[in-house]
Amino acid sequence: MDDTPSIEQAAFSVESSSLSDQVATIRLALKTSPVRRQLLWVLIGIVGVIVATSIGQVLLNRWNQPFYDALARRDLQGFLHQLMVFAVIAGSLLVLNIGQTWLNQTIRLKLREALTLDLIDEWMRPARAFRLTHAGAIGVNPDQRMQQDAGHLSDLSTDLGVGLLQSFILLVSFIGVLWELSSGFVFHVGGYSLTIPGYMVWAAILYAGIASWLSWLVGRPLIHFNSDRYTREAELRSSMVRVNENVDAIALAHGEADARRQLEFDLGSVLGAMRRIYSAQINLSWVTDAYGWITVVAPILVAAPVYFAGDISFGGLMMAVGAFNQVNSSLRWFINNIGAIADWRATLMRVADFRIALGETDILHAKERRIELSENANGTLTFEKLEVASPDGCTRLAETDVEIKAGERVMITGDPRAGKTLFFRAIAGLWPWGGGRIGMPAGEKPFFLPRMPYFPLGTLRDVLNHTEGGKIEDAEISAVLGEVGLERLSSQLDRSARWEHELADDEQRLLAVARLALRKPKWVIIDEALDTFDGATLRRVLAMLQARLPDAAILNIGRGLHNIQFFPRALTIVKDSGRSALKPARLRAGAIEPPPRAVRAKK
């Protein structure tokens, strides 16, 4: 039974990070990425392509006046000449557009590579992944944040960033054209003439500004709605994976109805989140769609008084309308992308806060007492006034000061809720909170054997050679497998499989013991891995350890003494529930997380 504090019990609270913190975090991830140079060159390339495209758009806009004037004059030769000019401009823009599409896709790939590699690197720092699982809601479903959210953030950032850059360059390119075109506009009202410099520029800014303000006002709730949806989707996927991995136990317990209820509950949460998003999107569509329809005639309405007064030709009118549309299109980038911006903001929050949390797991409880980890020059393992803190009390040894010498075999026992696994993890350096000192033998690297071992993907030979040591001969591997009762695996050394699914729980533990024997460490610390073996299997394992590790010090943290001759020394773990050195620490997490599953299920 795992007596480590659960996620619901862990003493962590969440605090949202600011947008500036999130942007700075992503910028740091990109700055230290191994693909940063490639990404930089691609970005420079797309800026050049967008600038060239903007120049082409300006030339195309200027082409409007002679083309439409030729039509108005019924000038066939001029008309055909302008068609040739159009072919050159349009052909060039076509090549540039295809190049921009390729660069856009390349940026997506490189950005995702950079973000995902950075998150994996941060997540796989020593003990971070373990500590994150006990860091509250931010540590739930890290796979989604690294795989789905990072990919989605890369796509959104590329599309929005390139679109914003393109809109800005087009705005700079055309705002001068539109200012020049509308500088001669003269309004005749009641016998008076009124000139407004850059009249159509101010009209475009006012028009787009009002629509942008309304769009943000209506679309802002989408940020929280999208974040909530991603969290609910992760819960549903986690439930489905859990059911799939426990189908045999569910069938034996006739638990299909309970599993179905939980899946239906999680699906209902997803659907509810999606309904809120769709409702907000419909409200937003009233603004954006109405704005789009008005834009069809808006530039003509703005320039119509000057045209009907005879102060501008039809070609000049069309050129002014084209420039107005380009400026307005640039200014309405925000309006067109308000939904995507809200989605980007929610995804940025999830990815950035996850990365921030990875770093903060190393400094949590900075003001709390920590267990001192050091080395003993005399080669002994010592526990001096050791207290392992948790939210519900302190775990410690009944003896205040303990020294274990090389070659000793010690059995450490305690009540089911005494915190034996927490004590094991404290020795391994995974759980640093508490007090006192753990002195490890200098120059030694103990072998830690947990209750359920970890096997990397690969062949059985890779699993057993999963060590920093040299290659182990097949004959020795077969001999050790036979000694632990897994001789049937000797013929499968080159077969790749997910061994945690191929083998029963006890077989996995026996395979881990075989790996221990092949590694030949001088210090071994075991956490309840021997407790489930029957008498005959346990005797066989202990005999193998006696023969292959005669000089190794072995600490077995478990439920009983099993074999007093093999473990002549006994220590006891006790739990002091009245004392708790672990107090809540603040951990930032911007995503909207669901309440604990056990609480939600009761509602």
Image (tube, rainbow, N blue to C red):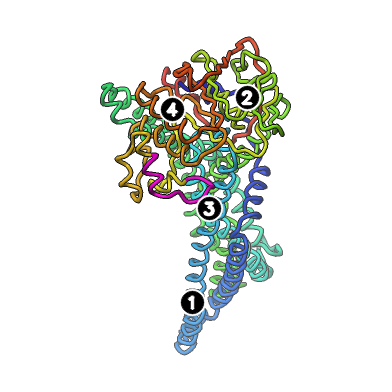
Instruction: State the residue at coordinates (66%, 64%).
Output: 188
Q: Helix or strand or loop: what does disc 1 sit on?
A: helix
Disc 1 crowd, CA 10 A, few/some/many (<14, 14-19, 20+) = some
Task: Tell me: 332 left or right of 585.
Answer: left
Quadrant housing residue 575: top right
Q: Helix or strand or loop: what does disc 2 sit on?
A: strand
Marks 4 and 2 in Cβ contact (< 8 Å): no
Residue under label 4: 542
Q: Residue 413, image x and y in percent?
A: 52, 17
Instruction: State the residue at coordinates (67%, 70%).
Output: 180
The answer to whether residue 179 of the structure is visible from this angle is yes
User: Marks 1 and 3, Cα distance to the nearest angstrom?
Assistant: 31 Å
Residue under label 3: 154
User: Marks 3 and 4, Cα distance to the nearest angstrom?
Assistant: 53 Å
Marks 1 and 3 in Cβ contact (< 8 Å): no
Amino acid carrying label 4: it is: Leu
Disc 2 crowd, CA 10 A, few/some/many (<14, 14-19, 20+) = some
Question: What stretch of residues is rendered in magenta?
Answer: 466-480
Q: Is residue 472 magenta?
A: yes
Marks 3 and 2 in Cβ contact (< 8 Å): no
Q: Which is in the foreground here, disc 4 or disc 1?
A: 4
Q: Residue 113, image x and y in percent?
A: 53, 55
Residue under label 1: 90
Q: Helix or strand or loop: what does disc 3 sit on?
A: helix
Amino acid carrying label 2: it is: Ile
Instruction: Work out whether mark 1 precedes mark 2 in sequence or the reverse, and give the earlier one.
Output: 1
Q: Which quadrant, please, contains the N terminus?
A: top left
Residue under label 2: 404
